Amino acid sequence: MTRHILLINGPNLNLLGRREPHIYGSTTLADVEAQAHAQAASLDISLETFQSNHEGAIVDRIQEAAGWGLTAKSLDAPSSAESDGGEQSKNNSNRPDRVSAIVINPGALTHTSVAVRDALLGVNIPFVELHVSNVYAREPWRKHSYFSDKAVAIICGMGAYGYTAAIEFAARHMKLEEVD
Ligand SMILES: O=C1C[C@@](O)(C(=O)O)C[C@@H](O)[C@@H]1O
């Protein structure tokens, strides 16, 4: 039995390390994800990472994390195995049916996205909200989050170390469903 954690990064976090380094530091997303995979292995959990600049893609990925996510379109279309020679199903073959916890840095969607909030609530998977910067020490509108009142924990202002702290917390302190 394994516990599965999904790490999601929202818009512009693909630019970590290059983007406003005085705010977000010099660690790249590739560094963050490599470190997260090494950490997960040492904690004996499985970890998947996902980054998108698109709100709808993040909603889709959260639905998939619950083993759902069939859209009206995909119900009509031939199965991915038929339509893409099995490529999609091959890529997904190591995916658990259900993720036990989500660590999410929603980026700017923190302050705008009812859709991502609703997706997280809809799948009922516990999540940790994470921000690299201290959003409370920045523009006043960054203080409002569509996620904080539903998050199990919130981490902000720890820089890239926040990802390590969030995964550690999720793995050791959240009661994670074991799935296989
Ligand atoms: O894109 C981001 C990154 C951020 O989530 C952070 O990690 O500090 C903070 C958000 O306000 C901002 O829009």
Image: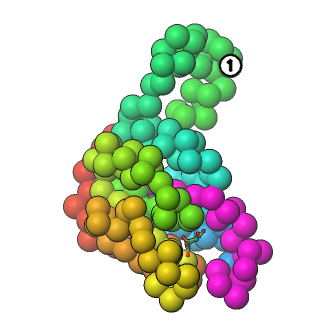
Residue 161 in view here: no
Please name the residue shown 39% across and 31% down the image: 68
**To which quarter of the image does residue 62 belong?**
top left
Residue 57 rendering spot, x and y as whole percentages: 57, 42
Q: Quadrant of ligand 1?
A: bottom right
Q: How is the image coloured?
A: rainbow
Q: Is residue 91 above or below residue 100?
A: above
> Does 96 sit left or right of 132 as displayed?
left
Give the quarter of the figure containing the C terminus. Answer: top left
Residue of label 1: 84
Q: Secondary structure at mark 1?
A: loop
Q: Is residue 42 above or below residue 85?
A: below
Please name the residue shown 49% across and 64% down the image: 111
Query: Magenta includes 72?
Result: no
Judging depth in this view, the residue of 54 and 125 nearest the camera is 54
Please name the residue shown 64% across and 65% down the image: 13
User: Quick one: which residue is furthest to the left in this view?
Assistant: 175
> Does 97 sit left or right of 85 as displayed?
left
Residue 50 rendering spot, x and y as whole percentages: 57, 52
Judging depth in this view, the residue of 152 and 176 nearest the camera is 152
Residue 131 rendering spot, x and y as whole percentages: 50, 74
Q: Residues within 10 Å of mark 1 (few under 14, many from 20)?
A: few
Query: Magenta includes 25?
Result: yes
Please name the residue shown 48% across and 24% down the image: 71
Q: Which residues are magenta?
A: 1-26
Ligand 1 within 8 Å, label 1 CB: no
Residue 31 rendering spot, x and y as whole percentages: 66, 71
Mark 1 belongs to which amino acid?
Asp
